[in-house]
Amino acid sequence: MYRRPLQSALRTLFVNGNRGYGQEVCSVRALVSCRTRVSSPCLTTCRTLHSTPQLCNVNEKPQHTEEEVGAFTKLIEAMGFTGPLKYNKWVKNQDAALRMYTCCVERINYDDFFDKCSLPDTMNSWFLVAQLHVWMCMVRMRQEGREGKYMCRWLVHSMWEDVEQRSKIMGIDASHRKEGMKSMTETFYAAIFGYDEGALSDDCVLAAALWRNLFSRECEDPKQLELMVEYVRKQMQFIDALDGEDLMLTGEVKWRPLLEENAQSILKVATPTYNDTGL
């Protein structure tokens, strides 16, 4: 009984399949609704499916559209080559990524973190704090499309080069340095997944990620976790308000202090919008 309306709905779904993920979701929901209504013994007609190209987004600022590239382009970019990116833009992205990592290392008061979070003054503690700030920069740059993701790779590359150089300066031999780098690599990528989940979830999930990665499961003071959750939230809000073009060009990132009396004051005031008449 409902076979013909269902076939029509499926045909509409596949025709509109290339218009984006949001339209597919709307079409699927409408398809389920259509099938439910037609299968009812009280109704014999099916409403026309409607879709809209406008997607709802909680972020009001315009987002970069992902450029469609082939598999070969993605492969050579993953290997470190520029692909279709222009040479001058490629060099600027590398320089900006190096400056951004420098901001993660030189513009942070690590002594405050060691003191307030009861972390030992060791290279491993320094790395745990540094990787937290590198992750926040990566979250921000991933919003800038393919060039931002390319810049993230150079940001991580700069971090590993710095870690290796610091290990050599401390006199760690090659075998122990290799084992330490392997352990730090596993810690870093595990922390990224945990922090990403915490950033997209509530404060309890973020606190659990900080407890596992930053505190190495040894924090027993809830005030320390509360302090770090507040710090990460306000810091990501502040970085998100920075202009993406400036970050791609300069890589300059300023960090808020660990302790602040009024953390809400860091939020960027929303820019007023005007109509064609200037009102």
Image (spheres, rainbow, N blue to C red):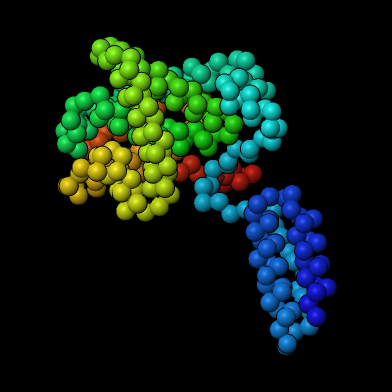
Q: At 58% across and 41% down in the image, what residue appears? A: 62
Nearer to the camera, 274 or 152: 152
Asked whether, in this view, residue 237 is left or right of residue 95, the answer is left
Q: Do we see residue 227 in this rendering?
A: no
The percent position of residue 129, horizontal first and vertical second, equals 29, 31
The mark total stands at 0
The answer to whether residue 217 is above or below residue 248 is: below
Q: Do we see residue 27 in this rendering?
A: yes
Q: On the rendered image, what quadrant is the N terminus found in?
A: bottom right
Furthest-front residue in this view: 175
Asked whether, in this view, residue 37 is left or right of residue 178, the answer is right
Nearer to the camera, 60 or 114: 114
The answer to whether residue 154 is above or below residue 26 is: above
Asked whether, in this view, residue 103 is left or right of residue 8, the answer is left
Nearer to the camera, 114 or 268: 114
Q: At 24% across and 43% down in the image, what residue appears? A: 217
Furthest-bottom residue in this view: 42
Q: At 73% across and 64% down in the image, what residue appears? A: 50
Q: At 49% across and 23% down in the image, what residue appears? A: 154
Nearer to the camera, 143 or 190: 190
Identify the image quadrant of residue 76.
top right
Identify the image quadrant of residue 64.
top right
The answer to whether residue 186 is above or below residue 76 is: below
The percent position of residue 163, horizontal first and vertical second, equals 34, 20
The percent position of residue 4, horizontal first and vertical second, equals 83, 73
The percent position of residue 31, horizontal first and vertical second, equals 71, 67
The answer to whether residue 260 is above or below residue 41 is: above
Identify the image quadrant of residue 84.
top right
